[in-house]
Amino acid sequence: MLGSRRSRRRLTTALAGLGLFVTGAALQVTTTATPAHAATTHRVLFDDGHAEEAGNADWIISTSKPDPLSQDSSPSAETDWTGALSSWGVALQKTGSYSLKTATSALTYGGSSTTDLSNFDTLVLPEPNTLFTTAEKTAIMTFVKNGGGLFMISDHTGADRNNDGEDAVEILNDLMTNNSVDSTDPFGFSIDSLDISSGYPAAISDSTDPVLHGSFGTVTKSLIADGTTATLKPADNSAVKGLVYRSGYSGNTGAFFATSTFGSGRVAFWGDSSPIDDGTGQSGNTLYDGWNDTGATNAALALNATAWLAGEGTSGGGGGGGGGTTCTASQLLGNNGFESGNTTWSASSGVITNSSSEAARTGSYKAWLDGYGTATTDTLSQSVSIPSGCTTAALSFYLHVDTAETTTSTAYDTLKVQVLNSSGTVLSTLATYSNLNAASGYTQRSFSLASYAGQTVTLKFTGVEGSTLQTSFVIDDTALNVS
């Protein structure tokens, strides 16, 4: 609306998703961490922030959190660490190639905590029993999309260990279908609402699969002791693959263990928590030793899958929570049309808005910088990791400039589009727009970011308005398409 005046009314919803935060100007993101061993150490985070110890469950690698090494720095037996997943943790630790931590608080991506997902290659969700928040779901999905590995372990429907009305089937399905990054069946499967009492699901015949035939052994069977399966939907994601099936099932139904990819990352699903239980949990819990069940090869399945999710093997993405060495064609920006409101992006107060004073290009929300007619600086930014294997990285967005300025020669109000590194240093100014670019409707702007492949960068829009006569810079339908 030409010449519109914008009030100081602003949205005050707190920023969510990815743990992104504003530090005055640019978003500061820590994307690397000092590993416990060599630079090639696989960094694995086990979640314990969602009632994983409720009821009879004890899904932890150690009672020492976040660092299990504080309980025993050189474990040799599963009882050296205390927890029903201690066998899993000790087996990885003994290789010397893994750095393990436990998260006990909200999951973030792009924050400063030691358990922020940007510091890990793989996230393990061992039967979560409370729903993930909107911000956590954004963090998890963006972590995977940018190259992380996600290990989702469910249990049977109705396994509500903390009696909050939610079980792992519902919680993991909610993660996949109700998030701000991609809710259109991103992994290509859904978890079935079933309670299968018992069985020994068999592995498919595929000698090339790194999960079934990996460095930790060969997988032949798994174990169901009250569990569920998944229904695969390859039409939604052609990478989805069933590896272990309930007896009598194959193809797209009855998958007890499945893998997939999303963006540059990898995903694994297991339909029961009994196979990862080693029977050595804390006193008072009733546990079952599925890890060492002689009728199955659960240890090899868990360990091979962890290795694959962390970047080993040849198919899919993985390997670094955002710095994968392969490239899967995808769109990398979260909440790219702003329809999830103040999530994923870091923005000045009120920038992401559904105000009717300026129309969105599509949907209801857009990013509206400046437009006050007073001296104002507004910013909008998002951190994104571009896999090193990508030869194409095309940034695009639609821009509408609306101004009350009448000059045809002087740029009083400006919008800069910049690329910054994780320290906030400007690597490139892609473009500068001003009141001289005012026009009706939206115009698409496009830039190549291929030269930043293999890096985590921050995309930043900075609008600076003079002391009189408003100029509004309105952005919608952003994208960063890589291939």
Image: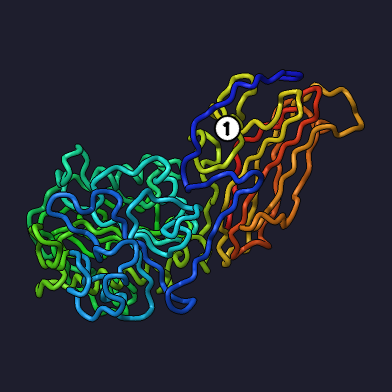
Report x, y in % for residue 281. Answer: 15, 64
Q: Which residue is mark 1?
A: 352
Q: Is residue 392 above or below residue 172?
A: below
Q: Is residue 408 above or below residue 152?
A: above
On the rendered structure, is 146 left or right of 251? right
- The furthest residue to the front: 70
93 and 69: which is toward the camera: 69
Q: Which residue shows up at 45% across the image and 56% down it?
A: 113
Q: Is residue 127 above or below residue 135?
A: below
Q: Which residue shows up at 38% across the image and 71% down it?
A: 99
Asked which secondary structure carries label 1, the reply is strand
Q: Which residue shows up at 54% across the image and 36% down it?
A: 338
Report x, y in % for residue 230. Answer: 24, 52
At label 1, the amino acid type is Ile
Quadrant of the drawing holding the C terminus: bottom right
Quadrant of the drawing holding the N terminus: top right
Q: Is residue 403 above or below residue 249?
A: above
Report x, y in % for residue 154. Answer: 23, 53
353 and 203: which is toward the camera: 353
Report x, y in % for residue 424. Answer: 66, 54
Graded by Cα atoms within 10 Å as few (under 14), some (14 to 19) or many (20 or more), the crowding at tag 1 reads many
Residue 267 appears anywhere in the view: no
- The furthest residue to the right: 409
On the rendered structure, is 455 left or right of 188? right
Residue 219 appears anywhere in the view: yes
On the rendered structure, is 318 left or right of 443? left
Q: Quadrant of residue 314?
A: bottom left
